[in-house]
Image: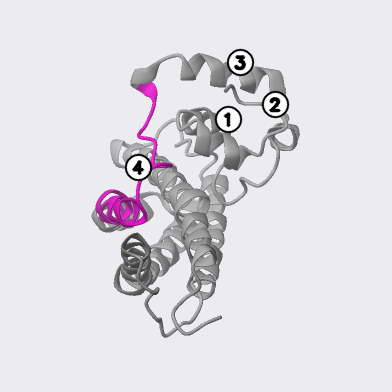
Amino acid sequence: MKPEASQTVREIAIQHPHSAQVFESLGIDYCCGGKRSLTDACQQANIPVDHVLDLLSVTGSHPENTPANWTGAGIAALARHIVEQHHSYIRRESPRLISLLGKVVIRHAAAHPEVRSIQDLFGALADELHVHMMKEENVLFPHLAAMEAAADEGRPAPLAMFGSVETPIHRMLADHDDAGELLARIRDLSGNYSPPENACPTYRELYRSLEEFERDMHQHIHLENNILFPRALELQGNKAPHGRS
């Protein structure tokens, strides 16, 4: 089934994993802002929808370019992938980017004061993500895995201190929105990650790495917002937690 203009960006991203590459290249939000139709998203980005559909068709014709499709994976397996792939990436890259930002600020902030603002924004983002990931890894993800195991074995769902999974999921979604806003401000301040013509190699590596960090965050948030969390809510709806009617 080919993508259609009437579908939401979220639906296309779920059904056609390769579409993330196209959306990234065009600046179309497929994670936090994925509830819009492709037509509306293209209008906002001032891009002809037929052009985007053509790009999606061409990209989808090359299987080697298609990332893994997680729509059929179990909840525990997807959560484990998110931790091993995306959480590990954040923990690895955040200190390196903070170090690069420090060097660029020292050498270039006088001529390019925006890098100091980018440093502050990324520092806030890294701090928020650290707390966010700890909550997922220590509380939410283990509970979702336990819910799935109970459902598979025909047992009552485990009780949780937070009651319905809607409560922590709502908090995680809000965190994702905050992260998206911080990344958008960084992109804007950096001129879409375009270093000055006379930028040194460290400056250029900083902007390249920040752009890569944003791409990984988009895929990370897409997997949670559009696949993991809806499946968890569906699982809870199909079988009421133990002790609830």
Q: Which residue is mark 1?
A: 26
Q: Which residue is mark 3?
A: 54
Relative to 237, 71 lies left or right: left
Q: Earlier in the sequence, mark 1 or mark 4?
A: 1
Instruction: Kindly indicate whether the residue at mark 3 contacts the one at mark 2 (C-beta within 8 angstroms).
Output: no
| Residue 28 visible to an observer of this rendering | no
Q: CA distance from mark 2 to mark 3?
A: 12 Å
- State the SS at label 2: loop
| Residue 196 visible to an observer of this rendering | yes
Q: CA distance from mark 1 to mark 4?
A: 18 Å
Front label number (1 vs 4) = 1
Q: Earlier in the sequence, mark 2 or mark 4?
A: 2
Instruction: Kindly indicate whether the residue at mark 1 contacts the one at mark 2 (C-beta within 8 angstroms).
Output: yes
- State the SS at label 4: helix
Between 191 and 240, the residue placed more toward the observer is 240
Task: Give the position of the C terminus as an image quadrant.
Answer: bottom right
Q: Which residue is mark 4?
A: 209
